[in-house]
Amino acid sequence: MKIPQLRPWQIAVILLLALGLIILSLSGYLNSLLGTATSPLVSLQSWLSTRYVALYEFFTAPRDTLALRQENEALQSEVALLRKQLIEYEEQLREAEVFYALLNFARSKPENQYIAASVIGKDPSPFMGYVILDHGTNDGVRHGMPVVTEQGLVGRVTAVTANACRVQLVSDAGFNANIRTQQSLAEGLVVGSVTGDVTLEMVSQDVVLTPGELILTSGLGGNYPADVLIGAVETVRKEENALFQAASVQPAVDFRNLQVVLIIRNFRPVEVEPLIPETTE
Amino acid sequence: MGAIAGIVVLLAGLMLQTAVFSRLTLMSGAADVVLLLLIAWAMRKQTREWELWFWTVFGAVFTAFISAVPPLITLGLYVGIIFVSRWMRNRIWQGEVLAYFFSVLLGTVIQHGVTFAVLRFFSGIALELETSVVYVILPSLVLNLLFAFPIYLLMKDLSDWIYPGEVDSYV
């Protein structure tokens, strides 16, 4: 290829033109002209770049989604695990609070020896207010032992196997216990019912019962230790012609949410039946 | 196979009964899952007689062992209710589901009625009839009828699984 031979004046003209263009460009006189000239190029460049990025994402995005999905799944399982742990910790905290309250109660009555037991079931018959505990004769539980919580009397053990026992609740229809009221020192009988309501009965008409007055076991009859809280007087029913007055009782223990109880192991119920004279016909 | 399944199903049912369903009360009433399981099993055409009575006695004995209701009453009630259910299933209707629901209704009333009478008149517990009907018997009946159908479906599937070649055409 033959390179054209430029004459000196031609070179000088070209250099002058180039220099002039550079000066004009630097001084900004050529901006509009350059903008008009480069605009289609920029548009083309932009179009190409957009298409390239789109194609690149098309080929690389599925791999990213998969990685994100895996990461998402891993994070979700971690969240689920942490939630489960949180629930477990909350449950343990709740149990610890219950045990702490029971421990405080046990410490406040050092004369008694306790067996802590969990409630694992309820009697299948809706007529019977009984619960099943997870401790039996293997743990020292015996028939007739009173059952309490830090709130008050729960009931007494009525049947025992090696590893479980059945407890008659204060709210059972067949329950009755001798009591005395804390303020008026009235004696009476607390009985349960099929609906779970607890009633105070056989209280002398002379006594003035006041709502809110505490009801404690009296120890009479030998089935329960004395001075265990049962509940408080709620509403008094006093009829002029009746022999005794009665009152509905707000039990100290919430029998629907019983979880852990204490069995008083050093209390032996007194068998009073041999002392009751037989009736002769 | 049916007898082994019966032991597993009834033990699971009894555990669920004492741990869950007895606490799931409507007023003071509660469903009796063991009774529902037994009645549902009694309704199945494929059920062998000896298996049914094995299930019944097994369920009754274990329930009696746990419950404070006099054991012989529990045993007698379960056997009696299953006998009546089976009789109705065989003699009165060809519609299995209808017979099942009627058996649940009748069985619940018999069960609670007899329990009330025994506790009231023989155990000396001061139960009032009106209170017992309103707060225990009717709510228990409602709950039993509520849980009856899911338990029926469960037992139907179990029955079809144990006796695969004898699927009936009642439902």
Image (cartoon, coloured by chain):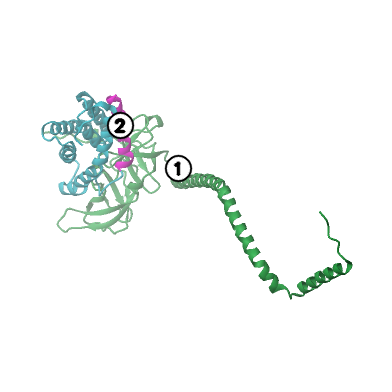
Chain colours: A green, B cyan
Q: Given the image, what chain letter belongs to the residue carrying mark 2?
A: B
Front residue of B21/A229: it is: B21
The residue lying furthest to the right in this view is: A8
Q: Which mark is residue B9?
A: 2
Q: Are marks 2 and 1 on the same chain?
A: no
Does A161 lie within the magenta span?
Answer: no
Q: Amino acid at mark 2?
A: Val
Q: Given the image, what chain letter belongs to the residue carrying mark 1?
A: A
Quadrant position of the N terminus of chain B in the picture: top left
The span shown in magenta is B1-22
Q: Which mark is residue B73?
A: none
x, y percentage for residue A46? 62, 61
Q: Is residue B79 above or below residue A18?
A: above
Front residue of A38/A70: it is: A38
Q: Secondary structure at mark 2?
A: helix
Q: Tell me: A280 left or right of B71.
A: left
Q: Which mark is residue A110?
A: 1
Q: Tell me: A114 left or right of B151.
A: right
x, y percentage for residue A107? 46, 44
Q: CA distance from mark 2 to mark 1?
A: 46 Å
- Camera sees residue A227: no
x, y percentage for residue A162? 36, 29
Query: Alpha-carbon neighbours of circle 2 within 10 Å: few (<14), some, or many (≥20)?
Result: some
x, y percentage for residue A212? 32, 58
